[in-house]
Image (cartoon, rainbow, N blue to C red):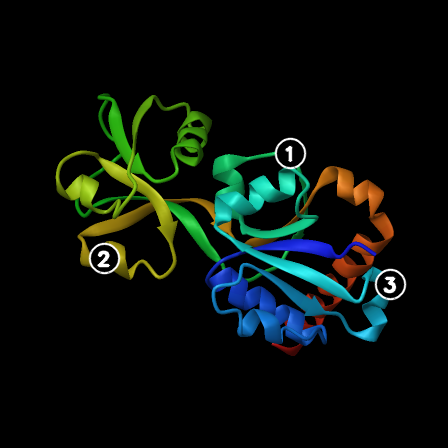
């Protein structure tokens, strides 16, 4: 039987997903001792043997997780809502995994009133599509500049009036003289599924997804 293949976003979401797999009774030793390998076997417990004895974990960058799932080389993927909102794609978003929580927010220099006046505002962001959608929803005509590195620099250098970025604690903003004006959208890790795979491997995938959902529910109950 062809193994189910799931793409995980490298880093924090990878670690959190492996923790979820551990709670489900999977043997994740190969992922924890991966070295430089990028495709790794995870052994399923007997009660999930209907999904096949082994699933394959593929470690990738966030945007690539979407690409691999969308093109069907991976059946499932774990990726942040931030990446989904920015890149979009054709897949099913089936489960909010609840970890990797943070938010998109609009931040401006302390003492600045972003929404005052009638001049066109400029926003710097690593996420131009998210930013555009947010300001379109407000009916605001805003110039957006894409930044690859530390987006907090843009208003400090006078390049922009504010930024749209991912915020967790807000400490980095505060240290750079910025404050959150408004939350744009909440973010957490999501489970996505290839549309064709969901039809062709419906029983196997639904069994695995159902077990993930039950484990997450137990986790919430114990908190």
Q: Position of residue 16 (x, y in %)?
A: 55, 67
Marks 1 and 2, how far apart in space?
38 Å
Q: Is residue 115 above or below residue 27?
A: above
For marks 1 and 3, the one nearer the N-term is: 3
Instruction: Name the spot of residue 81 as percent of width and height, x first.
Output: 53, 47
The crowding category of the residue bearing disc 1, from other C-alpha atoms within 10 Å (few below 14, some 14 to 19, many at least 20), is: some
Q: Which residue is mark 1?
A: 90
Residue occupying the point 63% across, 69% down: 20
Q: Secondary structure at mark 2?
A: helix
Mark earlier in primary sequence (1, 2): 1
**Would you say 214 lies left or right of 84 here?**
right
**Residue at the spot 12% in from the left edge and 40% down from the top edge:** 157
- Name the quadrant of the N terminus: bottom right
SS for dot 1: loop
Q: CA distance from mark 1 to mark 3?
A: 27 Å
Looking at the rendering, which quadrant does residue 91 occupy?
A: top right
Q: Which residue is mark 3?
A: 50
> Please, what secondary structure does the residue beneath circle 3 have?
helix
Question: According to the image, label 2 marks what residue?
Answer: 174
- Check the image and report above or below for 129 versus 118: below
Where is residue 72? Give x, y as percent: 68, 41
Q: Quadrant of the C terminus?
A: bottom right
Residue most extreme to the left: 157
Extreme residue in the front direction? 36
């Amino acid at each position: 039987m062809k193994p189910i293949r799931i793409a995980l976003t490298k880093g924090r979401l990878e670690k959190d997903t492996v923790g979820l797999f551990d709670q489900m009774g999977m043997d994740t030793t190969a992922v924890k001792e991966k070295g430089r390998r990028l495709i790794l076997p995870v052994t399923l417990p007997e009660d999930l043997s209907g999904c096949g004895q082994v699933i394959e974990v593929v470690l990738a960058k966030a945007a690539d997780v979407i690409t691999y799932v969308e093109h069907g080389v991976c059946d499932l993927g774990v990726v942040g809502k931030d990446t989904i909102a920015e890149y979009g794609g054709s897949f099913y978003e089936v489960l909010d995994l609840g970890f990797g929580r943070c938010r998109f927010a609009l931040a401006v220099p302390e003492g600045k009133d972003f929404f005052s006046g009638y001049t066109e505002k400029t926003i710097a962001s690593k996420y131009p599509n998210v930013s555009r959608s947010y300001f379109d929803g407000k009916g605001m005509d805003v110039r957006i500049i894409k930044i690859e590195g530390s987006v907090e620099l843009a208003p400090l250098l006078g390049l922009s009036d504010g930024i749209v970025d991912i915020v967790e604690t807000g400490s980095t903003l505060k240290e750079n003289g910025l404050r959150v004006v408004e939350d744009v959208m909440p973010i957490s890790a999501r489970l996505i599924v290839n549309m064709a795979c969901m039809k062709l491997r419906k029983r196997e995938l639904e069994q695995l997804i159902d077990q993930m959902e039950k484990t997450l529910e137990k986790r919430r109950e114990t908190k």
